[in-house]
C-alpha cells in the first residue's frame, strides 16, 4: 500500500492549541474544535438516532511522520488506520481519521479493532480513565482533499479540524476530526 490516507494525499499542517487564537477560526468551527466530550455524543444530542458511520478505510499501515511522533511509535511500525464519514439523514457531517498502535489495541482488549460501523467515540468515552493528552488544529484547503473524498463528503470550501491524542490505560491513540459545512450551518 503506497498511501497513508484515503482522505488526503499529504499530511495537513497542524498547529498546537496555544496558537488557536491567532488562527482566526470561525466560531461555528471553534465550537466543535473545543468540544471536551465525544463528538459522537454531541452529534446524537443534535441529530438523534439518525447519526451513522460509514467506514471508508481500515487497514494496517504506516502513519504520517508527525502522527508517529505524537504516538511515540517508530515511523516504520504499522498501526491500525481507520477513516470514517459520519452522517445524519445521509448528510455528511464529520470526517474522522483514527490511528491506533498495536499496544493500545492490546490494552483495550481488541475492542477498537472490531468497531465495524460503531462510532469510536461511543467506545473510548466509555473508558473511565480516558485522558486527553494533546490537541492540535488545522485548516485544510478544498484542493488538499482526495478527489473521491471531496465528492463523497461534499467538500467545497476549506475545512477546520482537530487532532487529539488520547490515552487509554496509558496507551495512546490519535483521533483527527474534520467538520463539514453542513454541520456548521
Image: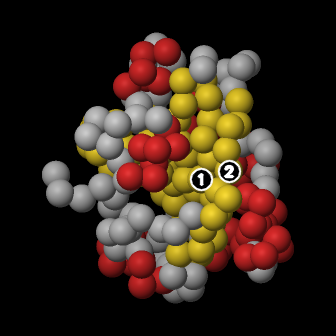
Query: Does 32 appear above or below 160?
Result: above
Pointer 2 and pointer 1: residues touching (CB < 8 Å)? yes
140 with respect to 75 (left or right): right
Q: Which mark is residue 176?
A: none
Q: Secondary structure at mark 1?
A: strand
Where is residue 121? Give x, y as percent. 62, 38
Which secondary structure lies at badge 2? strand
- Residue located at (32% from left, 69% from top): 9
**Residue at numbered disc 2:** 135
User: Vertically, is 22 above or below 173?
Assistant: below
Position of 86 with respect to 7 (left or right) is right
Residue 76 pos. (x, y %): 26, 40
Task: Residue 104: tell me if it is visible.
Answer: yes
Residue 83 at what x, y percent from top left? Answer: 42, 51
Upstream in sequence: badge 2 or badge 1: 2
Residue in the foreground of this view, choosing between 136 and 90 = 136
Closer to the camera in the image, 50 or 80: 80
Q: At x 30% / y 55%, what residue is drawn?
A: 4
How was this image coloured?
secondary structure
x and y percentages locating residue 72 in the rendered image: 47, 35
With 115 as the anchor, is 172 left or right in this view? right
Res 88 visible: no
Residue situated in front as seen by the camera: 88 or 168: 168
Q: Which residue is mark 1?
A: 163
Q: Quadrant of the C terminus?
A: bottom right
Gap in angstroms between the C-alphas marked 2 and 1: 6 Å
Estimate how packed mark 1 is, as few (under 14), some (14 to 19) or many (20 or more) residues with alpha carbons within 10 Å: many
Amino acid at each position: 500500500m503506497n498511501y497513508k490516507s484515503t482522505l488526503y494525499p499529504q499530511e495537513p499542517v497542524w498547529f498546537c492549541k496555544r496558537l488557536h487564537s491567532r488562527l482566526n477560526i470561525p466560531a461555528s468551527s471553534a465550537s466543535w474544535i473545543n468540544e471536551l466530550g465525544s463528538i459522537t455524543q454531541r452529534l446524537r444530542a443534535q441529530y438523534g438516532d439518525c447519526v451513522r458511520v460509514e467506514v471508508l478505510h481500515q487497514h494496517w499501515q504506516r502513519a504520517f511522520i508527525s502522527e508517529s511522533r505524537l504516538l511515540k511509535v517508530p515511523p516504520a511500525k504499522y498501526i491500525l488506520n481507520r477513516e470514517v464519514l459520519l452522517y445524519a439523514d445521509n448528510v455528511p457531517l464529520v470526517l474522522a481519521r483514527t490511528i491506533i498502535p498495536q499496544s493500545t489495541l492490546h490494552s483495550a482488549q481488541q475492542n477498537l479493532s472490531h468497531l465495524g460501523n460503531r462510532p469510536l467515540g461511543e467506545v473510548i468515552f466509555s473508558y473511565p480513565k480516558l485522558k486527553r493528552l494533546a490537541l492540535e488544529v488545522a485548516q485544510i484547503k478544498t484542493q488538499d482533499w482526495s478527489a473521491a473524498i471531496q465528492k463523497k463528503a461534499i467538500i467545497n470550501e476549506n475545512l477546520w479540524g482537530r487532532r487529539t491524542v488520547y490515552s487509554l490505560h496509558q496507551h495512546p491513540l490519535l483521533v483527527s476530526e474534520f467538520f463539514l459545512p453542513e454541520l456548521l450551518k
